[in-house]
Image (spheres, rainbow, N blue to C red):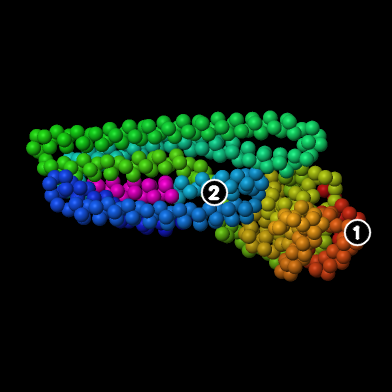
């Protein structure tokens, strides 16, 4: 899911670090090479700038793919999806642009420094080699708390976003029943919880940064002080001492930066952790709906309890019942957007959870109760007619799922739509949520939920 190609631009960085230290030590010790030093510094800046530009473009591509994956993900709550495709995908940028490059450099640069210093000053190289592991060890100890607090912070944000979305959707109903004020208090409570979790995560991040900076500073001092004393005693040449003093901070710098970026990218990693189930292909090909029976085997989810139904190939079923009885939930189960708490939905004897979601949706045609179309300047009836036209135009669909398809149409338009739908659906399986009597006349069987 994450584009890692920009990491290739980091290959010259360890060599440029060594070249810069060598030339700077030479210049400071009275040698030549100032022009070449300026060239190396300029090249290092250019390489890093090129990598950052490439990384930002990779982050944008990653955000696009994540949005598509989350929007296509079945069974994800609307509030969580809204949070993921807005705030969530943007939190991935620090991970791609900051943490991943630093994680690579945290291995490559210290290794290059230790190898170079092993030939210049073995004592300094061994000291760096002994102190380098202290930073990841302390970082891991603090990082365990970071993961826990970040997960809680993200959960609080998703809950707040989901509840707020539900409140906005139902604000008319809440006002009608005088419950808008009570929901304001609920939103304030959720916002306070998110604020508390955010501050807790920030406290751990600041503590981690302090610990890593302290360990890195002490480690550099363990290298610099002995080298300085040996230089004063004439035990080491000036060029070598300068080389050690210049390279020692470079060895610890990527580790410190990786530790800082770890916290900055914590939210992004939490978002990416939700992607494993969103692979391109997650199951087998759907059975042929023209000859496959659909079976609800003692399914329970939400308000639908112990629901069993057998739909023969080519059969047209109408679902009726009071509001909240689970009619739309049945359609959600067939779409794969809702997963059973217990029981199974079988298509041709295959559990729907084992069928590839994308290919399954391509085999269906669905009209929701409230279609959302672009532009949305159409009336409810016009939106319904356009949605029905699009659904009926899918000649390759083997299963039609219609949620009150004529709810916003007048009687004359309804009769025209039903006449057209009768021809399109003939010989294909259809499940219709119906309240109007005219719809019930078009089906083979009526099922009460």
Q: Is residue 413 left or right of residue 28?
A: right
Q: Is residue 63 left or right of residue 385?
A: left
Q: Mostly what secondary structure, the magenta segment?
A: helix
Label total for image: 2
Question: Residue 292 occupies which quadrant of the picture?
Answer: bottom right
Q: Position of residue 90 (x, y in %)?
A: 53, 47
Q: Evaluate whether residue 382 shows in this view.
A: yes
Q: Is residue 209 left or right of residue 440?
A: left
Q: Position of residue 357 (x, y in %)?
A: 64, 58
Q: Is residue 99 magenta?
A: yes
- Asked if 188 appears above or below 113 in the picture, the reply is above
Q: Position of residue 175 (x, y in %)?
A: 78, 36
Label 2 element class: helix
- Asked if 351 appears above or below 324 in the picture, the reply is below
Query: Which range is magenta?
Result: 97-114
Label 1 element class: helix
Q: Which residue is found at the position 50% from the left and 31% from the top? A: 200
The residue that label 2 is drawn on is 89
Foreground residue, 427 or 120? Answer: 120
Q: Which residue is found at the position 41% from the left and 31% from the top? A: 207
Mark with earlier residue (2, 1)? 2
- Which label belongs to residue 411? 1
Foreground residue, 187 or 437? Answer: 187
- Report crowding for label 1: few under 14, some 14 to 19, many 20 or more residues within 10 A (C-alpha): few
Q: Is residue 326 magenta?
A: no
């Amino acid at each position: 899911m994450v584009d890692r190609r920009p990491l290739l631009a980091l290959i010259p960085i360890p060599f440029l670090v060594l070249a810069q230290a060598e030339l700077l030590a030479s210049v400071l010790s009275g040698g030549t090479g100032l022009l070449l030093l300026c060239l190396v510094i300029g090249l290092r800046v250019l390489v890093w700038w090129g990598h950052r530009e490439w990384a930002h473009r990779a982050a944008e591509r990653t955000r696009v793919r994540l949005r598509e994956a989350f929007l296509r993900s079945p069974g994800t709550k609307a509030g969580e999806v809204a949070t993921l495709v807005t705030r969530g995908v943007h939190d991935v940028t620090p991970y791609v642009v900051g943490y991943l490059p630093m994680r690579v450099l945290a291995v490559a640069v210290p290794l290059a420094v230790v190898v170079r210093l092993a030939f210049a000053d073995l004592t300094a190289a061994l000291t760096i080699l002994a102190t380098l592991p202290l930073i990841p060890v302390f970082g891991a100890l603090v990082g365990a708390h970071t993961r826990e607090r970040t997960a809680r912070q993200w959960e609080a944000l998703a809950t707040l976003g989901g509840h707020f979305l539900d409140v906005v959707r139902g604000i008319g109903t809440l006002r009608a029943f005088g419950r808008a004020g009570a929901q304001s208090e609920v939103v304030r409570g959720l916002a306070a919880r998110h604020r508390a979790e955010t501050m807790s995560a920030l406290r751990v991040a600041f503590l981690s940064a302090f610990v890593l900076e302290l360990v890195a500073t002490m480690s550099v001092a363990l290298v610099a002080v002995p080298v300085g004393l040996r230089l004063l005693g004439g035990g080491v040449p000036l060029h070598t001492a300068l080389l050690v003093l210049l390279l020692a901070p470079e060895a610890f710098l990527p580790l410190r930066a990786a530790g800082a970026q770890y916290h900055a990218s914590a939210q992004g990693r939490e978002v990416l952790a939700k992607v494993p189930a969103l692979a391109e292909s997650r199951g087998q090909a759907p059975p042929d709906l023209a000859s496959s029976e659909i079976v609800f085997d003692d399914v329970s989810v939400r308000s639908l309890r112990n629901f069993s139904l057998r739909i023969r190939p080519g059969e047209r079923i109408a679902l009726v019942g009071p509001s909240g009885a689970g009619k739309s939930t049945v359609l959600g189960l067939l779409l794969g957007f809702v997963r059973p708490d217990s029981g199974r939905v079988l298509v041709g004897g295959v559990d729907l959870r084992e069928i590839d979601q994308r290919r399954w949706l391509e085999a269906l045609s669905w009209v929701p109760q409230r279609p959302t179309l672009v532009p949305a300047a159409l009336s409810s009836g016009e939106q319904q007619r356009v949605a029905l036209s699009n659904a009926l135009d899918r000649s390759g669909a083997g299963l039609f799922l219609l949620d009150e398809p004529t709810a916003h149409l007048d009687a004359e338009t309804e009769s025209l739509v039903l006449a057209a739908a009768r021809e399109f659906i003939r010989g294909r399986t259809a499940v219709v949520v119906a309240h109007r009597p005219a719809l019930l006349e078009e089906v083979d069987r009526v099922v009460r939920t």
